Each structure stands twice: as structure tokens, then as C-alpha cells.
Image (tube, helix red, strand yellow):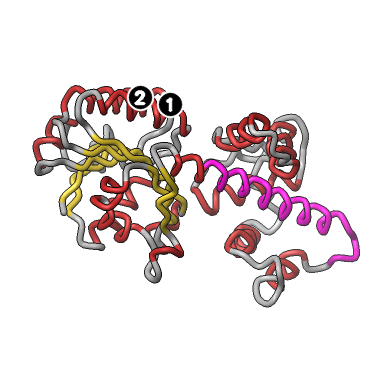
Amino acid sequence: MHIGLIGLGKMGFNMRERMRKGGIDVTGYDRNPDVTDVGSVDELLAAVPAPRLIWIMVPAGQITDAVVTELGEKLAPGDLVIDGGNSRFTEDQKHAAFLVEKGIRFADCGVSGGVWGLQNGYGLMAGGNEDDIAAAMPIFDALRPEGERADSFVHVGGVGAGHYAKMVHNGIEYGLMQAYAEGYELLAAKDIVNDLPGTFRAWQKGTVVRSWLLDLMVKALDEDPGLESIDDYVEDSGEGRWTVEEAIANAVPAPAITAALFARFASREDNSPAMKMVSALRHQFGGHATRPAK
């Protein structure tokens, strides 16, 4: 199978490598000449055999819109576009409607795994027509971890459902990170706690709070025990906001996720050890930039 991949940033670059290791031929395009395989989208489309499958892995919003628009003008009927970025599910529906008028198929896929996906594999949440998802299954199998497909891949539903599931996933992630970070700050504030990093390390096996995020928390403390190099300013990617907006729209109480989002806003005003930890965790799992301590 031979596909085209547009976007070779922190996620796309590693995804290209994992797909190739999984037996998928990948031609990648990126504006960065150091990582791209071809010099333009036109060269990419010429390299991929028909019917083409083009995976988009670029930032959500205007950049994704521009790529979809360009592909809509250059692809042929029967080609398939998959948006694997972090687009809002409502944008998927707009993009699908635009492409279907030209006979071009569209699917969306929420991808989780961050900078560790090349090594560990990615969790995948797909939305789209059943036949389109089936056509892309060799790609999903190459990207996901080894083992049962159902443990790391789901066809959630129609177009937009994959990104909706990924949005909720990220909202949960906000709440989990905030809980770990507040526990960190509480332990750090108590003078009788002599080994703070060791406390978290002791939770990694046998406790009900063990998780990959906890493992990354220990890693962050190993690298910078006092988190002295990190500012407490924490960005939000947008999906936490969308999750809260959807909770309001559907009258679903989501106090933990909402509070975690608001805590990120508060981090931009106050000096907070907890928010230093949230920033450190985002860097550990996703390679998100941190701000140097003031």
C-alpha cells in the first residue's frame, strides 16, 4: 500500500517512520525541506498511485482548511482524504461536504500517542464511512500498538465521530493531569515530606493511580527535580475548550474537566507549582514547548 502524508511535524514525522516500519510505502510532503520527500503537493500526488489515499497531519484550523481546499482542486473522484490532526468535529463535516461534491471521499481520525507514538504505537479513533475505514485499515494497523486491534483502534461512527472521541479524550487528559499536579503541589508544600520524587515513583506499581501519565511525571522529576527550569504558564490546545462547550451544549456536567481548563487560564497569572507540573507533563507526552522559568 502506498499513501501520501502531508505534514511532517512532531507527530507526522514519527508516523511516517512507523508506517514504513509496518510495511506501508509513504511519500511525505512538508514545507520544511529537511524532512520532506517531495518538493510540492503536486509532486506528492504524482507519486501516489490511484485511487489515492492522502493523510493530512497539519495544525487544525486555517492550515487544515487550506490543505483540504487544495486537495479538493487536485484529487480525482474516488480518492480518499483522512484528516489525522486535531480538527474540531464540525470542521470534518464541512470538509466532507466540500469534497463529496467532487466525488472525493473523506474520513477523520483522532490520533493519540504524542512523541512516544513511534516507539509505542498510537491510539486511533476513526470516523467515516465503513468502506473508507476498511480501505485504510492497513494504515491503522501499522500505526497502532501490537496486540488486539480493539485495544487501540475504534471506528467510532460517521464523519466527525473520530475527532469528537479524541476531543473528549483530551478533555479527560486535562482532568487527569490537573489531579496529579495538585497532588504534587500538596506534597511539595508539606515540610514532613522528605522524598517527593520517590513518593510518586512508589505509586507506579500496585496502586490505583498508576498510569503512563504518572510514569511521565516521575520522568519529569528525574530530569528536573524541582521543575526549576519550567515556567508555570500552560497553553491549551483548544480541545479542552471544545469539550467544555460540548458539555454545556448537551447539558452534561463536567466539573473536573472544566476546572482543569480554568486552572490553565489561571496559570497565566499566578506562580503555581501545580501548573509547572502540568506544563512538564505536556512536554513529556506531547513534546509541547514549555516556557523557561522567569
Q: Which mark is residue 147?
A: none
Quarter in which the C terminus is drawn:
top right
**Residue at point 79% right, 52% down?**
185
The dot on residue 65 is: 2
Quadrant in the picture for residue 214: bottom right
In the figure, 93 relative to 129: above or below? Answer: above
Q: Are marks 2 and 1 in contact (CB under 8 Å)?
A: yes
Near mark 1 (Cα within 10 A), the count class, few <14, some 14-19 or many ≥20, is few
Indicate the secondary structure of the residue bearing disc 1: loop
Find residue 289 and report its horizontal and vertical position in percent: 53, 41
Give the image quarter of residue 201. bottom right
205 sits to left or right of 90? right
Left or right: residue 54 compared with residue 251: left
**Disc 2 marks which amino acid?**
Asp
The kind of secondary structure element at disc 2 is helix
Instruction: Point out residue 186 in the picture as x, y percentages from the top left corner.
Output: 83, 54
User: Compared to 275, does 245 lie above or below?
Assistant: above
The residue segment tinted magenta is: 167-193
On the image, numbered disc 1 is attached to which residue? 61
